[in-house]
Amino acid sequence: MQTVIDLLHSKHLIWQGSKPQHSVETLSTGYKELDTQLDGGLPCHGVVEISSDLGIGELRLLTPYIKTNSKQRLSVFINSPGHLCSEYLTQQDIDIHRVIMIFPKTEKEALWSAEQCLKSGCCGSVTLWHPSLEVHQARRLQVASETGQCLMFLFKTEQKHQVSLPISLSIQLQPEENGIKVALHKRKGGWLKSSFSVDMGHRWPYLVQKQRSTFTTNDFNHQDPINNHDNVAHFPPLKQG
């Protein structure tokens, strides 16, 4: 006699822990520690939810990925808490002519803008600052990202508890002396792992607390494009329509 377990298994209603996960196409984040924990890097499309305080290096963590995806396609930033530093992007070899900043008047317009950019096929990455998403909103953005083969970074501006969303990845960032501490809260198609640290000292040693004391004022001016006013790059103006 067939058991209930066998019946459910024959209808593919049971998932076995020993069953291998479907491989997910990834792209390197530019950080060895992060690539190792994510089994290769960030997904090529989907929604990545990020809980983080402002100004702890959260955008620098995404810079290598955005740079790689901005070679042939656009990088879009929606409702950012401030204007991006064009000098920084230029120093990181990101073409500012392929960077678009959008400041919608309402949250509804922001979500609409993000969805259109994601599914357009013209964008390599879309970064949105938004309070939080409802399940149906997250699902629409996830589908749009798969349609346009574009990854979306969602920075939550309100850190409140909510239900699990149908997205590819959810992470939380916290500042550390050598860089950023990363905690994985949700990961599509993979196992969750304990929190880990990403060392940013090899890319930006003048921003790491343990190494700042070894730099002089001249070192800061030489390495930090914000303090160097000899080479100023401006964003090209764009017109609607």
Image (cartoon, helix red, strand yellow):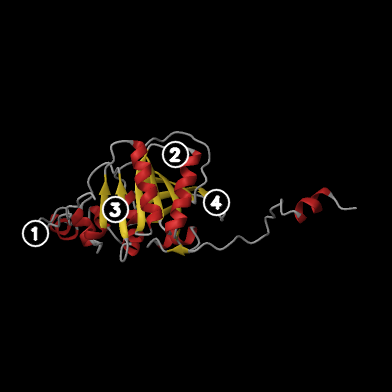
Q: CA distance from mark 1 to mark 4?
A: 46 Å
Tag 3: amino acid: Val
How busy is the neighbourhood of tag 4: few (under 14 within 10 Å), some, or many (20 plus)? some
Find disc 3 in the rendering and name its residue: 208
How busy is the neighbourhood of tag 2: few (under 14 within 10 Å), some, or many (20 plus)? some
Q: Which circle, 2 or 3, is nearer the viewer?
A: 2
Find disc 4 in the rendering and name its residue: 192
Closer to the chain start, of discs 4 and 2, is 2
Dot 2 lies on which element? loop
When asked about the image quadrant of residue 91, the answer is bottom left
Q: CA distance from mark 2 to mark 1?
A: 42 Å
Disc on res. 133: 2
Question: Residue 204 at x, y = what percent?
Answer: 27, 58
Q: Residue at x 34, y 41 (%)?
A: 110
Question: Residue 12 at x, y = what percent?
Answer: 72, 54
Find disc 1 in the rendering and name its residue: 230
